Image (spheres, helix red, strand yellow):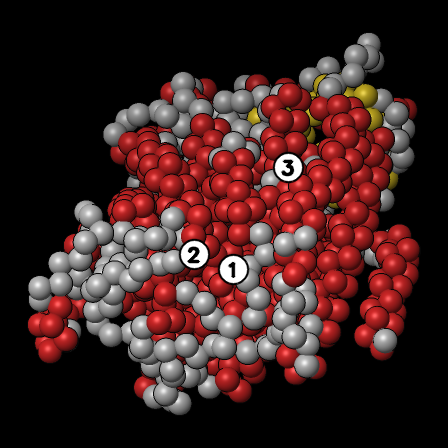
Amino acid sequence: MKGVKSFYYLVTASLLLLLASPLLADAPGVNFPEPASGSAREIYDIHMLTMKIATVILVIVFSIVIYSIWAHRKSRGFKADSRFHEGWFGRWSWVLVPAIVLGVDLTIAGSAQSALRSLWLVPEDKDLMEVKVIGHQWWWEFQYLDEGITVESRFMPKEEAGDLYLREVDNRLVLPTHRKIRFLHTSADVNHAFWVPELGFKKDAIPGYITETWTEIDREGVFRGQCAELCGTWHARMPIVVEAVSQDVFDDWVADQQATLLAAAAEAEMDKEWTLDELMDRGKELYDTKCAACHQVNGQGMPPAFPPLAGSQMAIADLPAHVDIVLNGKAGTAMVAWNMLNDLELAAIITYERNAWGNDTGDIVQPADIKAVR
Amino acid sequence: MSSTVMDHDAGHHEHHGPPAGIGRWLFSTNHKDIGSMYLIFSLVMLFLGGASAMVIRAELFMPGIQLVDPDLYNNLVTNHALLMIFGAVMPAAAGMANWMIPLMVGAPDMALPRLNNLSFWLLPAAAVMLILSFVVPFFPGGGSQINTGWTLYPPLSLQVGMAMDFLIFAFHLLGISSVLASINIIVTLLNMRAPGMKMMKMPIFCWAWLVTAFLLILVVPVLAGGVTMLLFDRHFGTSFFIASGGGDPVLFQHLFWFFGHPEVYILILPSIGILSHVIPTFARKPLFGYHSMVGAMLAVASIGMVVWAHHQYTIGMSLAAVNYFMIGTIIISIPVGLMIFNFIATMWRGSMTFETPMLFAAAIILTFTFGGLSGVMLAVVPADMQYHDSMFVVAHFHYVLLPGAVFGLFAGVFYWLPKWTGHMYDEKLAKIFFWTNLISFNITFFPQHFLGLAGMPRRIIDYNVMFTEFNVVSSIGGILFGLSHLLLLYIIVKCIRGGEPAPARPWEGAEGLEWEVPSPAPFHTWETAPEVK
């Protein structure tokens, strides 16, 4: 019977495709990137298992349906025959089919248990490192709790990043390999989510909550992820870059960061009258990094969500209100409080905003002025 | 309401027919006219929702931001979902319920005809609110666009301007419409079946809508509560979802998805009901497993009510909670698998012909199964750490919603157009529509699985160059897919205006009371209830 033969050819072809799938699965851009942690490996394995089970079921269903479409047609003279509705098949299939599906379901759920437990339960370890991950609109803040340093991680603009645009940042999350690291996630404003595919976890960053994940990175390298919860205008532009290095390199990097932090704090405390030029230079750099995402490098903003600063009343006239909105934010909008910046940084930014883009007020804000209104 | 029919003025109506003028439609209490209005409304919304999708795919054609700014893009993403779910699929299913339920059970109309009128007319009002929510930000002082996605999560939704308030009111109107229509459907099905039509003799399309109506009544009020709490947080100083006020952003997620997950069964069950009529008709063989079909629908609805948090695996739930939701979600594959099995067993050893409704039915069985299997993959929590909020999820739900709900509705349209209009639609054009639609659908959404696995998140306006190739393919498919619906519109309009006259029973294998009334069905039908053996 010709029909039965083509049916078998179809089934054979599909089974070959199924067997070949692990090879196809390694083609770039069609599957998960190479795992860099034990959890990520377990996840990859269970993904491949469910995909194979799904493919088998798909092949079976497609074969039966396509055969039936071909064979059981009026145009081929086939007469409708519902006798099998009444026989044992008709009476028992409603038990049999659920039983088979249940078997498949329990296999899948059972296989997932060990990966689930090891992913969810943070292991005990006296050498455990802790990093607090804070989502902001639209950048990441990483606080290394034991080392006492903070990294602010923003997207790198297209001119610098080239083909890595949207997958590169100015300051990476540097982490040591072969060490258990616990992440504590939260947000300063709206829901975000931290996702690095090579590390194999994704966790929401929710204001008012602290959520927890852990990892142990088992190879050095650069691993790129993105924010994975719609968080407003620039959700697409919040990459995460993990740079996994040896413990020694990591220690050097930490020492470097600590030194820079101390120097910046000392500078802000200096009892000095800053000149307009000094403030404008620092202000422009800070503004372009922290404020331009919304208010734009040219100060034009993106109304209605992000008001322009060039020619705005706030930046030309009302100095106390200007200081207040930068320091304390505006509730009910995307303008957050920037009180985590030090007095020198805030003074520089506000001075810059009041003198750039033709605003030219001539106003100079000193760090002491900011300190006075905190 | 007893089953004795008051036919003292049955003769009267035969002479008068439908009233003339705009009053016929504004004040209609006729299930056929109201059904037609639902269907036309849903067709308009289908095109609006489709237009937003076309802009999305055009923007995603190449890396870079070319056409729209991010907030407008996210608003289009939001509107695409809202228009399709609440504007196109649900009203189309309700329109078919209105048209067919009285015909199928031998009733002269729905139990509550004036309530029926209200249920429909709330929809254009809701649509106006929805459109205003899109248009208002374009005007000075209009505030920011709704850039939250259709899920409206706070705190982000608390940042949006007054457009969000228009949307919340649209939700209120849509919700009331659904609940009132559901009450009407349940009362009709429980009370107005012709004598002899026991519950287990009721057509499966009616069973599907009975279950859907109960689901709607159970879950729509929860959504209404959630968005009202959002409104209060926005304007009346409450802190239901504001952490700094002692509230909980995740509470909204639970309220939303407690509605949202049963909602997907609300979207699919009517189409399953339609297929349960189409497949036996074109296989010329009774539906296999009537009883197990009813049982499966009840099982899907019940289990579907307690697995909502599989949309929230990454919020930070405990191991026990997340394990429970995983197992519950995986279990749903049992009744769904049984339904698909019943369809295949109906086809098996039938004598099939492949007019357009049957083409859609066959396509649905194959592609919906594919989408259901990617759903089982998503249910597995560790793996979902990679899939969640990526394009893999987008591919999954388009593979179950489009082939499931939408193609099912298309099958219903082609199946019942002869009954509604009295004309056969153009079969040749309809087949061209089917093939272009099916093929372009697959070109659009199949590559999105790979985009998700490779690491592309969803709801983003721009992406890294590594995702370019599959996005190009998907966008080309998307534009073709969108354009193919113009052919659908042409076929429907052409059929309304004329065509080969359709007999009462245009399909050889069709069974049921609806095929015993003339085509087009007269303004009043079953004024005397038939006897059902």
Check if mark 1's residue and mark 2's residue have beta carbons within 8 Å.
Answer: yes
In percent of the image, x 69 and y 72: which residue is there? A72
Alpha carbons under labels 3 and 2: distance apart: 27 Å
Q: Residues within 10 Å of mark 3 (few under 14, many from 20)?
A: many
Alpha carbons under labels 3 and 1: distance apart: 23 Å
In percent of the image, x 21 and y 72: which residue is there? B523
In percent of the image, x 63 and y 71: which residue is there? A80
Mark 2 belongs to which amino acid?
Pro
Earlier along the polypeptide chain: callout 1 or callout 2? 2
**Residue on which the image places disc 1:** B276
Residue nearer the viewer, B8 or A276:
B8
Q: Name the secondary structure under disc 3.
A: helix
**Residue on which the image places disc 3:** B331
Q: Residues within 10 Å of mark 1 (few under 14, many from 20)?
A: many
Residue B70 is left or right of residue A9, and the answer is left
Q: Name the secondary structure under disc 1.
A: helix
Mark 3 belongs to which amino acid?
Ile
Q: Which mark is residue B203?
A: 2
Chain hosting mark 1: B
Residue B283 is left or right of residue B419, and the answer is right
Residue nearer the viewer, A245 or B213:
B213
Residue nearer the viewer, B414 or A118:
B414
Alpha carbons under labels 1 and 2: distance apart: 9 Å
Q: Which mark is residue A104?
A: none
The image quadrant that residue B383 belongs to is top right
Mark 1 belongs to which amino acid?
Ser
